[in-house]
Image (cartoon, rainbow, N blue to C red):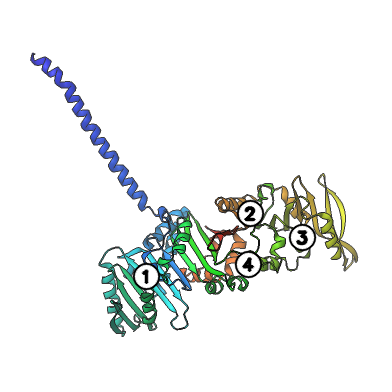
Amino acid sequence: MDKDEVIRDRRPMQARSFLTAVSAALLSLVLLATGLIWTMDRRSPLHLAEQPLQLPRSARFVPRDASVSLHWLADPSRLPAYAQAVAPASERRAARDGARAWRNGAFALAGLEFDAELAPWIGSEISLTLLDGASDPGWVLALTSRDSDGARRFLQRFWQTRSLAGTDLQISSYRGIGVISGRGALIGRDPQPLATALIDDDLLLLASGRGVLEQSLDVSQLKDQHQLGDQRLQQTVADLGDGVAVLTASPAAMQRWLQLPVELTERSDLAGLVASLRPDGATLAADAVLAFRDKLSPERWPPLKDLSDTAGGRALWLAQLQNPSRLLDSDDQHPLAQWLGPILRSQLKDQAAAATLVELDEGPLLWQHQADGWLLTTSREQPQQAVVDAQLQEQGLSRSELDGDGEKLSVWTRLVRQRGRTAGLEAQLAVAQAHAASVDWWGETLTGLKHRQDTRGLQPRLRQWQAISTDARPSHALVLGAEPSQNLLAAWQPWAFVQALAGQSLKGQVQGLSLVVDVDQQDDVGTTLPLHARLDLG
């Protein structure tokens, strides 16, 4: 074989070797880029809530009968970045600063400075427990460390700075764990009793007193007394899906902190509330269950028949109720009747005509509150017009027919005396009715009734309804626009607390609120009542 033939034979081999090398290099680059992108994507603040919920290790130190427990399962250092990422471009700095202020304010309640004392080492699992015991009420804060030495270094600086400020320290051992306690504070702050314990070098317990801390250490030794040993609670938390936090509340705390009615919270079979929190873009979503120890003796509430697909209007808020007549039955012992019934009766106060319709309606009912008065949608001939007419006549109303816009309306009016130059009698409208193929419409005013044809005006509320009802089995729902949401939250104590932590009013950021109650679910252990909420923030 001559030299030229050898060269020709080598060229394909060299080409193949070159292509193999290039392919390997390209494949390496692709894999490296994919790994970097995946890593950067997982570290993105937008993935803050994409994790299955579970009780953290610190739940071992939380009594099952704690008044309130809050387990935060996301890195608090990433919270401002998340708020900035989901906010509109013009509001990103304000959103970031607001989230930072809220986070720092929460830790300041325990006398901690997040940026200076916690940021370098704090991990993603944080638990707060409120205890209402008669002997030792107080709180316990559990903090995890990202490394094995961060919590220890913090503990040294923590007590050193407070010792310099005049705190007398007591160092002892309890159940084989070192406990440091003292009554003092940083310079310029009121003295407060504090106690700390370091568990396995990476879990720090900070409590409002030595007695409270020792109570948590006692509970941790008894599986049947702490949350981590509660298999039903663990399953409930897992069923809630993804999120950043788990909240539990005792019946007493549900009344005191969440302002739920006494008729519900003082039920002997009520075990408490378990809830999850999950940011979803600029919306804060919450899923919860009310747990009851026994099967409910009243008949289960049926699923809601959705009337929104037939609806139009200009609702500031809308409610969908399954069997409102049952909700208003004061003898019904179902938790929903005890909870929602008083709210519905309060809403109907001084609205006699609307109250008559709702009391007679066995559902479903779609109630819209508009600037031009209330607008109700009911199933065809439910309630029957003759029964409604008889009730309204007892209130001094008379029925007549009215032609308008090519349809015949039924109207109920009362005669009222006019004063002034045009003294005399005038027919004042109380309610007007219109029929459709499958539903009846009832309006407080003719203008409000006419709005039922405005399907575009109802779209903001319908989008809220669709967002919260997709994965639910609703029996009742309430969807509010910006102004009604702001007014409702203004009277709710936890919202005032959140604003206090943020150091500013958050009223202008509230764009909507949606609430859904599912049908109750029963098993051999008891009954759960699922709840869902979505708070839309600007």
Element carrying mark 4: helix
Q: Is residue 105 above or below residue 480?
A: below
Q: Earlier in the sequence, mark 4 or mark 1?
A: 1
| Mark with earlier residue (3, 2) | 2
Q: Amino acid at mark 1?
A: Ala
Q: Residue furthest right?
A: 424
Mark 1 to mark 3 CA distance (whole Å): 53 Å
Report the residue marked by disc 2.
303
Badge 4 density bin: few <14, some 14–19, many ≥20, Cα 10 Å: some
Query: In terms of image quadrants, where is residue 114?
Result: bottom left
Q: Is residue 4 left or right of residue 81?
A: left
Residue 513, given in percent of the width and then of the height, sits at 57, 59
Q: Nearer the viewer, mark 2 or mark 4?
A: 2
What amino acid is at disc 2?
Answer: Pro
The disc placed on residue 339 is 4
Q: Could you classify mark 2 by the number of other residues whose Cα lies within 10 Å: few (under 14), some (14-19), or many (20 or more)?
A: some
Contact between labelled residues 2 and 3, with CB atoms less than 8 Å apart: no
Of 456 and 269, nearer the camera is: 269
Given the image, on which type of amino acid does mark 4 rest? Answer: Trp
- Read off the residue under disc 3: 360
Name the mark on residue 142. 1
Instruction: Say which element carries label 3.
Output: helix
Query: Spatial distance from mark 2 to mark 4, Cα to Cα?
Result: 18 Å
Q: Are marks 1 and 2 in contact (CB under 8 Å)?
A: no
**Disc nearer the start of the sequence (2/4):** 2
Left or right: where does residue 388 sit relative to residue 80?
right
Q: How far apart, in angstroms, are the residues tagged by discs 1 and 2? A: 41 Å
The residue under the point 52% across, 63% down is 525
The kind of residue on which mark 3 rests is Leu
Q: Which one is nearer the viewer's eye here, 462 or 341?
A: 341
